[in-house]
């Protein structure tokens, strides 16, 4: 009788263990299926419609992907499930690349690229504000401007030179203001030297660019 009870206990324990194991595996399977479904649901939404909530989508994806990867350990033969997860990861990466392209800021216009090169990234925008230029930095601003023009003078079009002139005159106008704010005599002399260097360089190269433009127009 005692042996029967022991055998029954062992059988029940084994059954309980098997049941627990089955439940764990079933839960793991649901986690993986939920991850796959999430990827499919995201991929079926137009990328344009997800722009505003993309950070939330990314966070949710990372959470579900981590849970799916962890769930593989609870599935005895997980080869098929691993392939399923990898397929969904590939789908998501393709979609993510599409979103990255969509969310990327538009490339600056040629005019803005020129301004960035002459003054620094984003320093001069459409408002043409030079308020960031002061008595302490104006010499270095002129220096960067003139040296950049000198290094690229053979690449500029007639239109570029016209924009350069507008920017140069705006910088000169700002100089008239900062002279009253403590511009040193030494910096003033250095700026005068840069201006002497710029004037003939502008005149000669602008004329050359204009002549080249006319030559191309006649072809």
Image: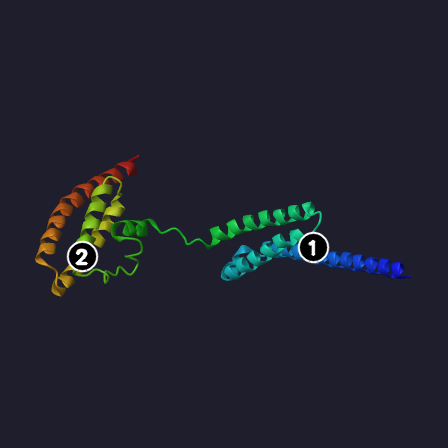
Which residue in the rendered view is the most extreme toward the bottom?
181
Q: Residue at x 16, y 44 (%)?
A: 203
Residue 56 locus on image (x, y percent)? 53, 61
Q: Quadrant of the C terminus?
A: top left
For this rendering, which residue is in front, 178 or 62?
62
Q: Which marked residue is nearer to the observer: mark 1 or mark 2? A: 1
- Camera-side residue of 198 and 85: 85
Measured as percent of width and height from the top left, residue 125 is found at: 30, 58
Q: Residue at x 41, y 54 (%)?
A: 105
Residue in view at x 61 percent, y 47 percent: 86
Name the quarter where the N terminus is drawn.
bottom right
| View extreme (right): residue | 1
- Residue 191's spot in the image, x, y percent? 13, 52
Q: Nearer the viewer, residue 19 or 43?
A: 19
CB atoms at circles 1 and 2 under 8 Å apart?
no
Say which mark, if any, is on residue 29: 1
Q: Could you say where residue 32 lies in the image, as x and y percent from the top left?
A: 66, 54
Residue 67, quarter of picture: bottom right
Lateral position of residue 67 relative to residue 100, left or right? right
Q: Residues within 10 Å of mark 1 (few under 14, many from 20)?
A: some
The reply, left or right, for residue 140 in relation to residue 45 is left
Residue sticking out furthest to the front: 2
- Badge 2, how many Cα within 10 Å: few under 14, some, many 20+? many
Rendered image coloring scheme: rainbow
Residue 122 is left or right of residue 76, and the answer is left
Mark 2 residue element: helix
**Cα gap from disc 1 to disc 2, whole angstroms:** 66 Å
The answer to whether residue 90 is visible is yes
In the rendered image, which residue does mark 2 sit on? 138
Mark before the other along the chain sequence, 1 or 2: 1
Q: Which mark is residue 72?
A: none
For label 1, the SS is helix
């Amino acid at each position: 009788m005692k042996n029967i009870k022991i055998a029954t206990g062992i059988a029940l324990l084994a059954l309980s263990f098997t049941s627990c194991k089955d439940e764990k595996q079933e839960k793991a399977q649901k986690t993986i299926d939920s991850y796959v479904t999430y990827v499919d649901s995201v991929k079926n939404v137009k990328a344009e419609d997800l722009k505003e909530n993309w950070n939330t989508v990314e966070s949710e994806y990372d959470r579900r992907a981590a849970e799916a990867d962890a769930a593989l350990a609870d599935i005895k033969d997980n080869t098929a499930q691993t392939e399923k997860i990898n397929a969904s990861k590939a789908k998501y990466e393709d979609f993510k690349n599409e979103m990255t392209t969509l969310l990327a800021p538009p490339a600056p216009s040629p005019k803005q690229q020129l301004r960035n090169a002459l003054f620094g990234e984003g320093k001069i925008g459409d408002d043409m504000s030079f308020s960031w230029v002061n008595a302490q930095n104006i010499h270095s601003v002129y220096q960067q401007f003139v040296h950049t023009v000198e290094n690229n003078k053979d690449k500029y079009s007639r239109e570029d030179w016209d924009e350069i002139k507008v920017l140069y005159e705006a910088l000169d106008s700002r100089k008239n203001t900062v002279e009253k704010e403590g511009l040193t005599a030494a910096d003033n002399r250095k700026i005068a030297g840069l201006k002497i260097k710029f004037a003939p360089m502008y005149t000669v190269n602008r004329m050359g660019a204009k002549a080249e433009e006319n030559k191309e127009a006649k072809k």
